[in-house]
Image: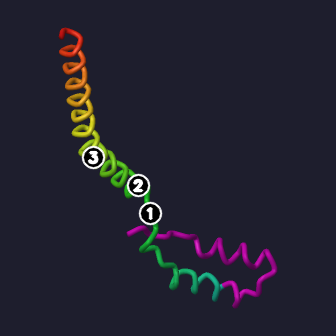
Amino acid sequence: MATLTIDTHKFITRLKAAGVDERQAVAIVEGLKEEANLQNVVTSADLRTAVAELKADLLKWLIPVLLGQIAVFAAVVKFLIAEVRV
């Protein structure tokens, strides 16, 4: 699970500089800390794992299909060569 790290003091200072009351700024920052749900955040490591799995799945299906196409092509060529000889 991903974690969220924020400088709460800096965040509160920014909010106060933007005209937010200090009590409201503290409440906003505390609310963000408590309610931030990062269970569904995708990290770059998650993406790398997913891409690797997709590549493996693609190769698992692609190689047999390509071999099948080569076999069909070879059979057609063999048939055509046999027809030309007759």
Compared with 65, 25 (above or below) is: below
Q: Where is residue 77 in the image (x, y as percent from the top left)?
A: 24, 20
Hey, what amino acid is under mark 2?
Answer: Leu
- Quarter where residue 64 is shown: top left
In-front residue for pair 21/38: 38
Q: Is residue 30 left or right of residue 37?
A: right
Q: Does the magenta stretch include residue 59?
A: no
- C-alpha separation, residue under disc 2 versus residue under disc 1: 7 Å
Q: Do the residues labelled 2 and 1 touch (CB within 8 Å)?
A: yes
Compared with 86, 24 (above or below) is: below
- C-alpha separation, residue under disc 1 versus residue under disc 3: 20 Å
Q: Is mark 3 on a helix, strand or loop?
A: helix
Q: Residues within 10 Å of mark 1 (few under 14, many from 20)?
A: few
- Quarter where residue 25 is shown: bottom right
Compared with 72, 64 (above or below) is: below
Q: Do the residues labelled 1 and 3 touch (CB within 8 Å)?
A: no
In-front residue for pair 75/29: 75
Hey, what amino acid is under mark 3?
Answer: Ala
Does label 3 or label 2 sit earlier along the sequence?
2
Looking at the image, the residue that sits furthest to the front is 86
- C-alpha separation, residue under disc 3 versus residue under disc 2: 14 Å
Compared with 11, 85 (above or below) is: above
Looking at the rendered structure, which numbered label has been put on residue 56? 3
Q: Where does the magenta region start and end?
A: 1-25
Q: Which residue is drawn at 42% across and 67% down?
A: 2
Judging by the rendered image, the residue that carries numbered circle 1 is: 42
Looking at the rendered structure, which numbered label has been put on residue 47? 2
Looking at the image, the residue that sits furthest to the right is 19
